Each structure stands twice: as structure tokens, then as C-alpha cells.
Image (tube, grey):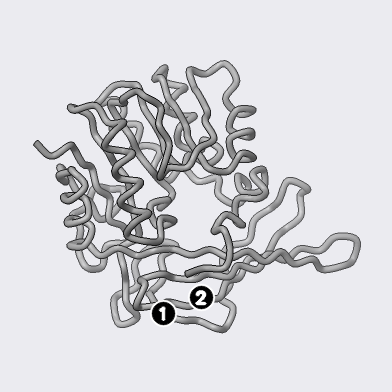
Amino acid sequence: MIDHDNLEEFSDPANYDMEDASDTGIAFYTALTQETGGPVLEIACGTGRVSIPIARLGFSVTGLDIVPAMIERACNKSVGLPMRWIVGDARTFDLSEQFQLIFLTGNAFQAFLTNADQGALLQRVYAHLHDKGLFAFETRNPIFPHSQPPKGLFVPLETNAEEQEWSPFIDTSGREVRVSRTSVYDHMTQIHHWTTYKRWHDGGEEHTKITRTALRYTFPQELTALLYYNGFSIERQYGDWDREPLTADSPSIISVCCKRG
């Protein structure tokens, strides 16, 4: 389906943090933590952008990620906090314990490209979720080219062979890095294949780093069925971080789920 490990964007954790220093999702998942209490598990936690602010409030948080370098940086950023960091595959991990809240953010759900991957993830979540706990995650709402463009960094499901400019960032060396992307959308697999080009100048020479990312898009009714058949009910669902109702033009599908009774 893809000829890479889908982890190329995460090979440089320090600059990953520089590229995305936003607070997107932090308030939402913090509020859920305050509702459920701990312990909390974040799957695909990256460098702890969301988990660390939650732990600073005194909650016990576990972060799990498949990339060792991301976990190493998360450890270095969270010294003295009530946190545990684990390198593991979200489809196969077994911690032999349960959590009041389990969440994925950063649209990490889209990295699970096949039905089997999605099912394996959800079964691991089910096994680790307390019977009265909540499971929450977001995924980009599939937007087709004829739709009203949503706000933010969301793009229609279409192929763009010509590079599209994205927001630049300043890397850890103080250099401006220009970012552009091309994309190919495969309607049969519902996967958007991105190629990202990062360019910067050093010593009078231009350097380019190329990474590839594949993102699975899951439609709202498809998502409801997927959750149902893996033992979950959707308790609440939103279209953005302001908790607006989900519509065809919403940028996100944000789902808060519980175990189906």
C-alpha cells in the first residue's frame, strides 16, 4: 500500500516541535481529563505536546509512541512530572492496566491506514479503558474539492502535483525553513499521500529534506460503524475545537466515546 514506514516526519523530534508549537487540542483534552480524572493514556503521544500540560496539573499520565526518539525527547521535556513514557506499537501494546481517559490527538488516528490497523488500535484501547472511562480522538473531516474550504490547515481530497506552499518555521539552528507539499489522493483506499519538501540555506547552499506521509480518511458514518463494532458508543461528537456541531464543512470529526453497554 505504501513503500515507506510512514514515520519519516518524526525523524527529527526537536525540529518537529519547532514546526508545531501550537496549543491545538490542549484545552479540549485537559477538560476531558478534569472530567474523568486520572490515570490518563495518550497513544501516539509524540514529544508530549498535549500530555505534558495535562501532567503539569498533577494528573498521572502515560505516553506511548512507536518512535524511540520522540519518547526520548518527551522524557527530557518532562523531568519531575508525574509521567511515564513507553515505546510501543498502538496496535499491539499491553500494559496490563486500565485508564480513565485514553486519547489520540494531532490527527494520529489517520496514520492507521487499513481496516485491520484501525481495528487493532481500537481493540487495544478497549482492553485498556476503564469500564466508566472515556476514549477521545480527532480525525480530519473528508472534504472534497467542490466543498466550502474549511478553516485552518485542511485541504480537499484531491491530487496536486504542483508544490503548494505551507507555513515556514524557524528551526533549532535559527534558520528559516520553507515548506511545500504535493499530494495524491487514492479514492479506493481513502488514503492521501503527501510529499513534503523542507528547504533552508546553510553556508550559501540550499538544502532540501523530503519526507512522505500517508493519511487515511474515514467518513462519519463509516467511523460510527467502526467504533460500534469494536465495542464503543459515541457519547459526544464535534466539528471543531469550539465544540460546534459536526457538519459536512466541519474541519474535524472530534469523537468522545465510551464502552458500549
Relative image position of residue 80 (x, y in whole percent): 57, 16
Task: Find residue 146 and report its image quarter.
Answer: bottom left
Relative image position of residue 224 (x, y in whole percent): 18, 55
- The circle on residue 8 is none
Which one is nearer the viewer's eye here, 155 or 183?
Answer: 183
* Left or right: where 23 falls relative to 126: right
* Left or right: where 214 falls relative to 148: right
Quadrant where the C terminus is found in the figure: top left
Relative image position of residue 172 (x, y in whole percent): 73, 46
Identify the residue at horizontal 28%, vertical 50% (top origin).
Answer: 254
- The amino acid pointed to by label 1 is Glu
Residue at mark 2 to residue at mark 1: CA–CA distance? 8 Å
Relative image position of residue 137 (x, y in whole percent): 32, 46
Q: Verify CB contact (< 8 Å) between mark 2 and mark 1.
A: yes
Task: Work out whether mark 2 precedes mark 1 in sequence or the reverse, and give the earlier one.
Answer: 1
Identify the residue at horizontal 60%, vertical 44% (top origin).
Answer: 17
- The amino acid pointed to by label 2 is Ser
Which one is nearer the viewer's eye here, 109 or 29?
Answer: 109
Disc 1: CA contacts within 10 A as few (<14), some (14-19) or many (>=20)? some
Task: Report the residue that reaches farthest toward the right.
Answer: 203
- The circle on residue 158 is 1
Q: Is residue 59 something one can see in this rendering?
A: yes
Identify the residue at horizontal 40%, vertical 53% (top origin).
Answer: 107
Tag count: 2
Q: SS class of the residue under badge 1?
A: loop
Task: Find residue 104 and report its image quarter.
Answer: top left
4 relative to 149, above or below: above
Disc 2: CA contacts within 10 A as few (<14), some (14-19) or many (>=20)? many
Identify the residue at horizontal 38%, vertical 74% (top origin).
Answer: 156
What residue did someone put label 2 on? 183
Task: Report the residue that reaches farthest toward the left.
Answer: 261
